[in-house]
Image: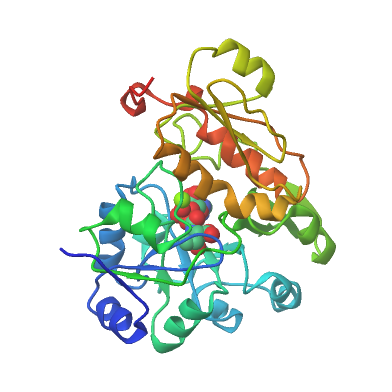
Amino acid sequence: MKTVIGTDITFAKLLLEKDELVAIPTETVYGLAGNALSPVAVTKIFEVKNRPSFNPLILHIKSIDEIEKYAIVKSEYYQFLQEFMPGPFTILLPKRDNIPDILTAGSDKVAIRVPQHPLTQQLLHHLDFPLAAPSANPFGYVSPTSAQHVYENLQNKIPYVLDGGEATIGIESTIAEIKNDQLIIHRLGGKSVENIQEHSILPVILVTQTAKFQTSGQLKSHYATSTPLYLGNVAELIYQQAGKKIAVISFYTDYSGTNVTTFPLSTHRNLTEAAATLFKTMREIDQLNFNIIIAEHFPEEGLGRAINDRLKRAQFIYRDETNVDSKQ
Ligand code: TXA
Ligand code: MG
């Protein structure tokens, strides 16, 4: 199957109506989309992404008004949910029966998101069904933030990539759940904890460290480059790894020297900008001839928390044998 990149919403709609998959732009990362109400299309997503079927998919809807069609939510929560949606925020709610079990991997909860990207908004308005979409990377690899990234990974596996330019936020949505009148954050992401706390009428709890929710990201590496990545004190790691060709991912500091090239994510020292360039930089480094990547810890505030989360999971120590690349 030849993969085409374009901006034709009518063509994308036509394909989706035939249970074909289309990569779609969102403000966080590109998604691999199919008709969420069609088990055939949802099955294709799992196959193309090579994703284990126990890992559920996010439901993408055109507006918050549609939440009630697919999930159960108390009316008093609408107002504060409107502060976050549309945007880089996903809410986990009890699902209704029209959501196929395969989408939620058998769970009675569904994760719902309203993406803000204008092209995908337009597409959703043209469709009479919502879209299931995981990030459009092969399972375990870095998420795509441009149509070109998707093309490099899924070429010949899907018919169409809807090109909406570079993702502005560049890191996946924050995933939260309303439970016992608390807002529980399960995945750090594009909407910062501080921002959520500011607008939430419910107490905000962070459980991203618990093992229970991390069905996939914990032991095996996730968001990972093929080049082994080490996270920690950069100067020490450079010393330990002397002799290798090293790429450093830093916030703004320049660690360059013999055999060491620095890729600062934001010379302006801005964590939002750093988040927007993280995945693009990881992919760029992966295409160059480095033996290893060393990354520093970012400040634990704003989007720095989500950056640290992704870097932790990308670490070499979390890889299993089958996943180890022999580039060293
Ligand atoms: O920004 C994003 O969220 C992107 C764009 C494309 O929307 N999507 C994304 O999807 O990151 P994915 O599949 O790569 O990550 C979604 C995460 C997975 O870790 C999955 O386990 C969790 O959300 N998830 C989805 N549905 C769930 C459910 N019903 N219960 C618990 N976790 C769920
Ligand atoms: Mg993903």
Q: Quadrant of residue 238?
A: top right
Question: Could you say where residue 200 lies in the image, as x and y percent from the top left?
Answer: 79, 64
**Residue 212: quadrant of the picture:** top right
Q: Would you say residue 223 is visible in this rendering?
A: no
261 or 116, nearer to the observer: 261
Outermost residue toward the front?
258
Q: How many callouts does the rendering have?
A: 0
Q: Quadrant of the C terminus?
A: top left
Q: Would you say 6 lies left or right of 88 here?
A: left
Point out residue 130 in the picture as x, y percentages from the top left corner: 42, 76
Q: Of 212 and 311, which appears nearest the observer?
A: 311
> Of residues 55 and 290, which is closer to you in this image?
290
- The chosen color scheme is rainbow
Instruction: Tell me residue 307's x, y (percent).
Output: 64, 44
Drawn side of residue 272 relative to residue 328, left or right: right
Question: Can I make out residue 250 in this image?
Answer: yes
Residue 11's x, y, as percent? 28, 82
Residue at coordinates 72% horizontally, 57% vertically from top-left? 183
The quarter of the rendered structure image containing the N terminus is bottom left
In this rendering, is residue 215 above or below 99? above
Q: Is residue 261 above or below residue 279?
A: above
The relative height of residue 109 versus residue 37 in the rendered view (above or below) is above
Say which quarter of the image contains residue 7: bottom left
Left or right, 21 with respect to 205, comes to left
Q: Residue at x 39, y 33 (%)?
A: 226
Residue 244 in the figure: left or right of residue 9? right
